[in-house]
Amino acid sequence: MASKAALDFTKIYSSLGLGKQSVAQVQAFRKRAEDAKRALTLLKDQPTTVDFAHYESILKNKDVVNQAKKIINEFKPVSYDVAAQLKAIDAFEAKATEQAEATSAKIQAELKDLKATLKNIEDARPFDQLSVDDVVAARPEIAKTVEEMVKKGKWTTPGYDEKFGNLSAI
């Protein structure tokens, strides 16, 4: 029990980068395992012997006690084939591993993109040092839009006055 208290599963989940579905599946599996351990402990604590002498002294009908004794002595526990359960556990483990690897690959790709974006931001010139030519080179559609507006005789930008007010009175 001491080792169980030392494990911080939330830290483990976050360090492995597991997705919500993987974490939920692992937590459900842990809950089922804990329930099974608890049930096993309860069953181990129960007495397994029957005091037939006690029942023979209480009951008048000795045949009932003899019949119960015979049934208990002839009882053979059923063995279960756990191969199916082990196969299901292996399949669950394989699926969880596959999902964890996919999540890890996705996070690595995002991290690579974020690092590239950060590098671009760090290497970019400040906004006040940009020229019109720099902006047009970066976004050629701006030049096309301006050319269209000049051809049509539009000298104002739609929505500018509403947002910033008309400064022509100054």
Image (tube, rainbow, N blue to C red):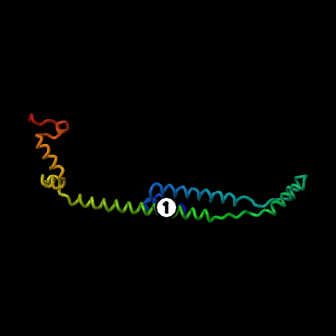
**Which residue appears at 76% of the width and 64% of the height?**
76
Left or right, residue 98 beside residue 32: left
Residue 158 position within the rendered picture, expressed as x and y whole percent measured from the top left: 18, 39
Q: How many marks?
A: 1
User: Which quarter of the figure is the C terminus placed in?
Assistant: top left
Farthest residue in the top direction? 169
Residue 94 position within the rendered picture, expressed as x and y whole percent measured from the top left: 51, 64
**Which residue appears at 48% of the width and 63% of the height?**
97
Residue 41 location, quadrant:
bottom right
Left or right, residue 104 beside residue 155: right
User: Which quarter of the figure is the N terminus placed in?
Assistant: bottom right
Q: Could you tell me the amino acid type at mark 1?
A: Ala
Left or right, residue 151 beside residue 98: left
**Which residue appears at 14% of the width and 35% of the height?**
166
Q: Element at badge 1? A: helix
Farthest residue in the left direction? 170
**Which residue appears at 75% of the width and 59% of the height?**
47
Left or right, residue 55 beside residue 48: right
Task: Name the foreground residue: 45 vs 161.
Answer: 161
Give the residue pinned by disc 1.
Answer: 96
Residue neighbourhood size for the residue with mark 1, other residues' Cα within 10 Å, grouped as few (<14), some (14–19), many (≥20): some
Residue 18 location, quadrant:
bottom left
Residue 124 location, quadrant:
bottom left
Residue 148 position within the rendered picture, expressed as x and y whole percent measured from the top left: 14, 45
Task: Name the foreground residue: 147 vs 113.
Answer: 147
